[in-house]
Image: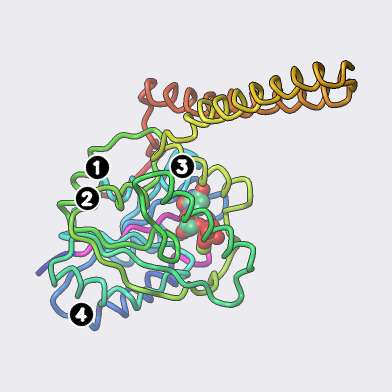
Amino acid sequence: MKKISIVIPAHNEEGNVSLIHQRIKEVFSGLENYRFEIIFVNDGSRDNTQQKLVELAEKFEEVKYIEFSRNFGHQPAVKAGMDFANGNAVISMDADLQHPPELIPEMIKKWEEGFDIVYTIRTYPKQISAFKRKTSDLYYKLLSVISDVNLKEGGGSDFRLMDSSVVDVMRNMNEADIFLRGLSNWMGFRQTGIHFTAGERASGESSYNLKKMMKFAFTGITAFSVKPLYLAAYLGFLFSVFAVLGYGIYVIHSFVSKTEISGWASLIITVVFFGGIQLIILGIIGIYLGKIFKQVKERPNYIIRSKNF
Ligand code: UDP
Ligand code: MG
């Protein structure tokens, strides 16, 4: 019998862990040839998630948990679950039921057809704000233009099945800032996607605010592209051309009209403008420098406080 490991990161999900376990159990009762385990990763929850997980694990042997020492973030939590999963395939999904467990049989079917990675393409329901949908679309378009990662179709999500051979490769990657959806796209293997409509969060609140989303977005870009670093060179070249042209115009003008071009306002604006551009570029270099700094320290992506297996 093949075993499917399901990895579920949980940050303040006390109302959802039992619910999602129930739904997954129902799905597997219809799948006779497969065993399953659920590895919940409690990512520093401040509510009663841990207690709920301990209770659940006492009742059901398929339930396992890993408790982090503090909040390390969604991506490290998924990574931790994959590091400890030993199924023939591993599925990662959110705890809040926005990723419907009912899609699992279809994912397994694709896997059995020979695909190593079955990713999902999310269509947003009407309830999700147009702002979130549009920015997400735009972001993945930008990412695919400036890097080798192509998550264009409806954007990425971390609802994904991976064969154990893929998980083995993933396990040995020790990037400081992990961006799993990018990594799995970048890895290759035989991949296919299936569509799903993201549901509403079953209970509790989203842990992703605008600030966290921005950080996640930057992580994705800087982990897969060095193009932003070239910006300085491109802009430098562009403005040098402007400067040479401007100087030519100035010289010709002073010969023809025999008067100076006046105006300190334009001077100040130009100085401020270039000051701004230089700071932006310094900032970009700083972001990459920070990544190198993080990476050379080789700190682990997460620290485990307890686990039941
Ligand atoms: N999550 C986590 N650590 C965090 C933030 C989120 O483990 O710091 C988990 C969360 O419990 C959920 C998944 O990651 O299972 C997705 O988070 P959320 O639903 O808050 O994000 P959204 O769906 O709103 O993008
Ligand atoms: Mg959610």
Q: CA distance from mark 4 to mark 3?
A: 39 Å
Secondary structure found at label 4: loop
Q: Which residues are magenta?
A: 4-17
N-term mark: 4 or 2 = 4
Q: Residues within 10 Å of mark 2 (few under 14, many from 20)?
A: many
Judge whether 226 appears above or below 160 on screen.
above
Q: Residues within 10 Å of mark 3 (few under 14, many from 20)?
A: many
Q: Which residue is mark 3?
A: 221
Q: Residues within 10 Å of mark 4 (few under 14, many from 20)?
A: few
Q: Residue at x 58, y 27 (%)?
A: 281
**Marking on residue 31:** 4
Check the image and name the residue furthest to the left: 1
Q: Measured from the top left, where is residue 270 in percent x and y?
A: 76, 25
Secondary structure found at label 1: helix
**Marking on residue 204:** none
Q: CA distance from mark 1 to mark 4?
A: 28 Å
Q: Measured from the top left, where is residue 133 in percent x and y?
A: 57, 65
Q: Nearer the viewer, mark 2 or mark 3?
A: 3
On-image quarter of the N terminus: bottom left
CB under 8 Å between callouts 4 and 2?
Answer: no
Q: CA distance from mark 1 to mark 3?
A: 21 Å
Q: Nearer the viewer, mark 4 or mark 2?
A: 2
CB under 8 Å between callouts 1 and 4?
Answer: no
Check the image and name the residue furthest to the front: 256
**Marking on residue 167:** 2
N-term mark: 1 or 3 = 1
Q: CA distance from mark 4 to mark 2?
A: 23 Å
Q: Which residue is mark 1?
A: 171
Q: Measured from the top left, where is residue 68 in percent x and y?
A: 42, 42
Q: CB at mark 1 closer than 8 A to ligand 1?
A: no
CB under 8 Å between callouts 1 and 2?
Answer: yes
